[in-house]
Amino acid sequence: MGFSVTATHMILFIAALAIAAGIAGVVSETGDVIEAGIQKKMEITEKMFETDIKIIHVQSDEYTFVYVLNSGKRVINPEKMGVFIDDEWRTFTYQILNRSTNIDNSLFDPGEILVLNTTSLLPGKHKVKVVVQDGVYDVYLFNK
């Protein structure tokens, strides 16, 4: 009877160690997932802080021209921008003024001015909102 009690205790001890190791593995994996999520969130926030634009002028005649300055530290892809006039999305074409010496001239580099050409407007007060990647935007109010 003495050996069976010892064997039973040994089996229960080994089972407890196996369960504890399994729980430790799950906790470790959960910690890694949480750490990766926090790191991704920090990268997104860093991109938002480094990306900035400023609408410096709007000229509205036959068409509406929106002059946008890349005042941030990151390169912006104009193909991933959105233009809203009076809270309505508008199609646009663009041209980059004072191009830098960047090899890829289709990108909007820091310090460059981008001219967005969009539809004409009726006389009155208007609001232009330009949104770039990462959700950064600027708003400009003007009268035509």
Image: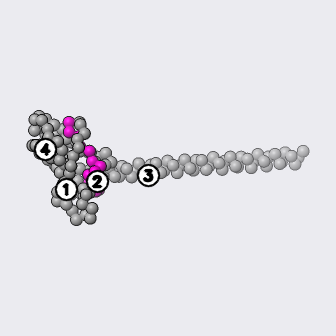
Residue position marked by numbered label 3 in the rendering: 39
| Separation of marks 3 and 2 at Cα, in angstroms | 24 Å
Label 4: element kind = loop
Give the residues in magenta. Answer: 71-86
| Separation of marks 1 and 4 at Cα, in angstroms | 17 Å
Whether residue 76 sits left or right of residue 37 in the image: it is left
Neighbour tally class for label 2: few under 14, some 14-19, many 20 plus, Cα within 10 Å: few
The x and y percentages for residue 32 are 52, 51
Where 96 sits versus 4, above or below?
Answer: below
Asked whether 22 or 89 is in front, the reply is 89
Residue at 21 percent of width and 62 percent of height: 100
Report the disc number at residue 96.
Answer: 1
Residue position marked by numbered label 4 in the rendering: 63
The x and y percentages for residue 94 are 20, 51
| Separation of marks 2 and 4 at Cα, in angstroms | 23 Å
Q: Is residue 126 visible?
A: yes
| Separation of marks 3 and 4 at Cα, in angstroms | 44 Å
Residue at 15 percent of width and 47 percent of height: 65
For badge 4, the amino acid type reads Tyr
For badge 1, the amino acid type reads Ile
Q: Earlier in the sequence, mark 3 or mark 2?
A: 3
Q: Earlier in the sequence, mark 1 or mark 4?
A: 4
Residue position marked by numbered label 2 in the rendering: 77
Label 2: element kind = loop
Classify the position of the N terminus by image quarter. top right
The x and y percentages for residue 8 are 81, 45
Q: Earlier in the sequence, mark 3 or mark 1?
A: 3
Whether residue 37 sits left or right of residue 54 in the image: it is right
For badge 2, the amino acid type reads Asn
Classify the position of the C terminus by image quarter. top left
